[in-house]
Image: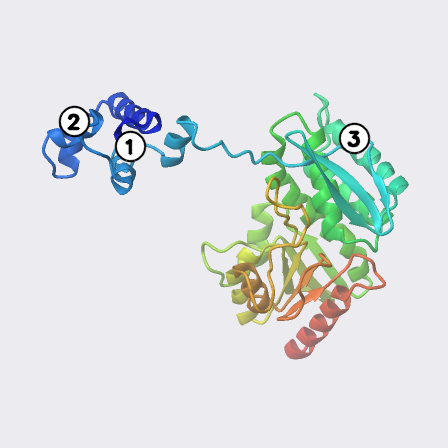
């Protein structure tokens, strides 16, 4: 079959010619960009010679046109839909291991298992968190998004302290926010509000427990707060500053001895702190699931395994004094330990206390 006359090929060439025309570039100008004669482009557009695949790629690049957009406009690609799967309101199916929550995405339904949660408990949690987020949509609401998210996570963890905290955050707190919050674009507002909420939650969750050990955990909500806490230290200029600082009380004063990061991307700043004698911890929910339509929504995280480590795992393993994951599916080892927000099973506070004791001894405080 002569592809020059295949309707798909004809449509491709015609669309390519329209892209050139709309860019106000002549056939001669495009040909000159490839050191070719004027007829080189004209012959291709008039179907006098076939257009090679690599040549098509280079043409689009020369015209400054997105390759994906070009083929999408031809109908050869379907535009990607990165919309998340959202829980169906008021629906939960009992399971021997917990509850299965139906999620809907483009009319398809996929059930997500939340282990250790009863149907009644999930529906209660859904109602409470939805009502909390609904306040954010009120025109005169004074409730901050980060505060609402932090409260939602606190509600969930208090109700189910032994469940996989990462699943609760990822599938319940996060997805309900995307479903309920309508005042602005939910996914964009989540990027900042969700991170700040987790920082706030960590301070609230561990603050009182560490205070009993003469340790102050301080959330540095503003960039100015972070600069004030760590400004005297030598940190890489472009590296992030820790969102949470650890101070120990001794001899009538407070002494900065450690920091908490929530992102593996901050490993460079963490290494700099450690080189100056401070402890640096990574607390991660390691929350990530493969989205529909190809994924199964199981929250396996992004740290990989010891035999197949991701960049995130390598950073978590080498960049921090210790790393703690609150996702029970995380492969531990390589300096990564499993943690839980249940005080009976959480190793983090005791490890921080040991670090403070070591710091005091070394500095003779």
Q: Residue at x 20, y 24 (%)?
A: 46
The image's mark for residue 89 is 3
Which disc, if any, is residue 3? 1
Q: Position of residue 95 (x, y in %)?
A: 85, 47
Disc 3/disc 1 C-alpha distance (Å): 52 Å
Per the image, label 1 sits on a secondary structure element best described as: helix
Single out the residue that lies furthest toward the front: 1
Other residues around mark 1 within 10 Å, as few (<14) / some (14–19) / many (≥20): few
Give how far across and how far down residue 197 sits, in percent: 69, 44
- The answer, for residue 234, to whether it is visible in the render is yes
Q: Is residue 232 visible?
A: no
In this rendered view, identify the residue nearer to me: 211 or 202. 202
28 up-or-down from 266: above or below: above
Tell me which label, 2 or 3, sits earlier in the chain. 2
Of marks 3 and 1, the one in the foreground: 1
Q: Is residue 270 above or below residue 291?
A: below
């Amino acid at each position: 079959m002569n592809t020059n006359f295949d309707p798909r090929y004809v449509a491709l060439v015609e669309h390519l010619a329209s892209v050139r025309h709309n860019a106000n570039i002549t056939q001669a100008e495009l040909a000159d960009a490839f050191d070719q004669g004027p007829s080189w482009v004209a012959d291709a557009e008039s179907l006098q010679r076939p257009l090679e695949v690599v040549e098509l790629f280079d043409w689009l690049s020369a015209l400054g046109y997105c390759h994906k957009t070009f083929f999408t406009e031809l109908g050869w690609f379907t535009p990607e839909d990165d919309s998340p799967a959202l829980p169906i309101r008021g629906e939960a199916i009992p399971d021997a291991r917990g509850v299965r929550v139906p999620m809907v995405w483009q009319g398809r339904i996929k059930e997500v298992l939340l282990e250790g949660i009863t149907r009644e408990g999930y529906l209660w949690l859904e109602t409470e968190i939805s009502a909390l987020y609904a306040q954010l949509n009120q025109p005169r609401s004074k409730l901050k998004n980060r505060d609402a998210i932090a409260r939602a996570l606190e509600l969930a963890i208090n109700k189910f302290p032994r469940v996989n905290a990462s699943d609760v955050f990822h599938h319940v707190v996060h997805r309900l926010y995307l479903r309920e919050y309508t005042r602005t674009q939910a996914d964009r507002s989540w990027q900042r509000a969700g991170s700040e909420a987790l920082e706030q939650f960590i301070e609230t969750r561990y603050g009182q427990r560490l205070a009993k050990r003469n340790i102050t955990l301080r959330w540095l909500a503003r960039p100015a707060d972070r600069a004030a806490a760590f400004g005297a230290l030598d940190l890489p200029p472009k590296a992030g500053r820790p969102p949470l600082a650890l101070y120990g009380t001794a001899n009538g004063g407070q002494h900065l001895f450690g920091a908490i990061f929530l992102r593996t991307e901050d490993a460079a700043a963490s290494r700099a702190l450690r080189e100056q004698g401070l402890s640096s911890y990574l607390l991660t929910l390691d929350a990530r699931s493969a989205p529909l339509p190809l994924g199964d929504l199981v929250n396996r995280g992004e740290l990989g395994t010891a035999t197949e480590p991701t960049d995130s795992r390598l950073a978590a393993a080498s960049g921090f004094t210790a790393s703690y994951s609150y996702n029970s599916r995380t492969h531990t080892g390589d300096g990564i330990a499993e943690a839980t927000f249940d005080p009976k099973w959480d190793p983090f506070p005791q490890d921080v206390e040991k670090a403070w004791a070591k710091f005091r001894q070394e500095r003779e405080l």
